[in-house]
Image (cartoon, helix red, strand yellow):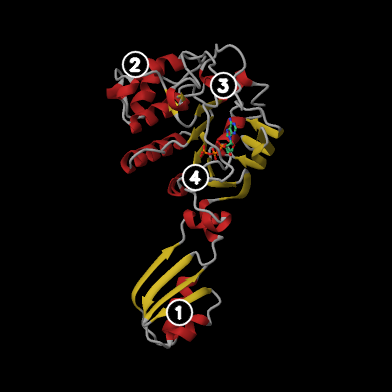
Amino acid sequence: MDIIEITGLRKRYGGRTAVDDVSFGVAEGEVFGIVGRNGAGKTTTVECVAGLRVPDAGTVSVAGLDPRADQAELRRTLGVQLQDCTLPDKLRVGEALRLYASFYEHPADWRTLMEEVGLGSRQHTAFAKLSGGQRQRLSIALALVGAPRVAILDELTTGLDPKARRETWELIEQVKARGVTILLVTHFMEEAERLCDRVAVLDGGRVAAVDTPEGLIARVDGSHRLRFRASPEAGPVLRSLPEAVTVGVEGDRFTVTGTGDLLLSVVTALAAHHIAPRDFTMDRATLDDAFLALTGHTPHQTDERSTTRDTRGTADPGAGATRGTEPGGKRPMVQDAHGSAGAQGDSTLEER
Ligand SMILES: Nc1ncnc2c1ncn2[C@@H]1O[C@H](COP(=O)(O)OP(=O)(O)OP(=O)(O)O)[C@@H](O)[C@H]1O
């Protein structure tokens, strides 16, 4: 049984369908990516997994739990870091971790966690004084302080500089190495390619494909590209190869795209005809190319169904958090549905 199972998930906001018949499963220990453009339905999907939204149709289960019906138990299983998260400016790193740890019966050791995420020297630093990368590391630590089996990390590296992004990736790899299952939302294909065992491509609220990054890339026609110089006789030889999808010629420069064993078949065929290629280079398609091939858009475009996001939250008093009340619609760093064992009331996010 998969640790996360989503079947036929559908969610509408007013007349707009955000998530439409989404199904996939996540195996325990996997880093599973959800990729898509802005507005594709990624956040809504993970909010349903976290029990923060009520699906209009379909079922979600996390370690056999129903995220809506079994909220108390879910808190012990699932750690959540949602997009645009924030904490009160004056709250210090150590205070935040100690506070969040206090919500759990069997938390991780917050001091150890603080060291592991590289914030040991920042224990007494106020949230407002942290850099973007440090805030993200803190948000990962807060998502893990309850020692969850599953962590949801939403757009973790958006807004980070390349160095901070790479450091965050290394941290996620360490979390994976502990056996934590990670549901990772991103619109950075490089991030998904590097970190994810499998990826669901969401487009217009629907699943366009679920596969390993390599599997998605292999679906791109002409996913391998060879460039070299050669004598004109190479043209007919290359065009006769079943592995070659396109053969371009400009003077003595050849560009051949294809799939599978393209390199081997090109080199073998040229050698058989005593043609020696020069200045040989090879590159392969990326997940960006696969995304474009699958959806017809680049991951950085916005879904035209999308509207400006509202704060999307209620001021649910828990964990000292101020969900939905921060300027700019920022959310608390870790949703209090899972961070505050003592939170009162319904933790569903408000809908327009
Ligand atoms: N609270 C809401 N009220 C109305 N519409 C919403 C609300 N939340 C999301 N939407 C709409 O639902 C669709 C899916 O949004 P969602 O945030 O799930 O997508 P996303 O892929 O996570 O995008 P982003 O990367 O921008 O967060 C979009 O059209 C969005 O405008």
Mark 2 and mark 1 in contact (Cβ < 8 Å)?
no
- Which of discs 1 and 4 lies nearer the camera? The answer is 4
On the image, numbered disc 2 is attached to which residue?
90
Residue 180 in sight here: no
Quarter in which the C terminus is drawn: top right
The crowd level at tag 2 (other Cα within 10 Å; few <14, some 14-19, many 20+) is few
Mark 4 and mark 3 in contact (Cβ < 8 Å)?
no
* Front one among 141 and 302: 302
- Give the residue type that dot 4 points to: Cys
On the image, numbered disc 1 is attached to which residue?
268
The mark that comes first in sequence, 3 or 4, is: 3
338 left or right of 59 in image = left
Looking at the picture, how far across and down is residue 272, in whole percent? 44, 85
Mark 4 and mark 2 in contact (Cβ < 8 Å)?
no
The residue located at (47%, 54%) in the rendering is 288
**Local secondary structure at mark 3:** helix
The residue located at (39%, 72%) in the rendering is 227
The mark that comes first in sequence, 3 or 1, is: 3
**Local secondary structure at mark 4:** loop
- Which of discs 3 and 2 lies nearer the camera? The answer is 2
On the image, numbered disc 4 is attached to which residue?
196
* Front one among 70 and 248: 248
Looking at the picture, how far across and down is residue 324, in whole percent? 50, 22
The CA span between labels 3 and 2 is 26 Å
Q: Is mark 4 within 8 Å of ligand 1?
A: no
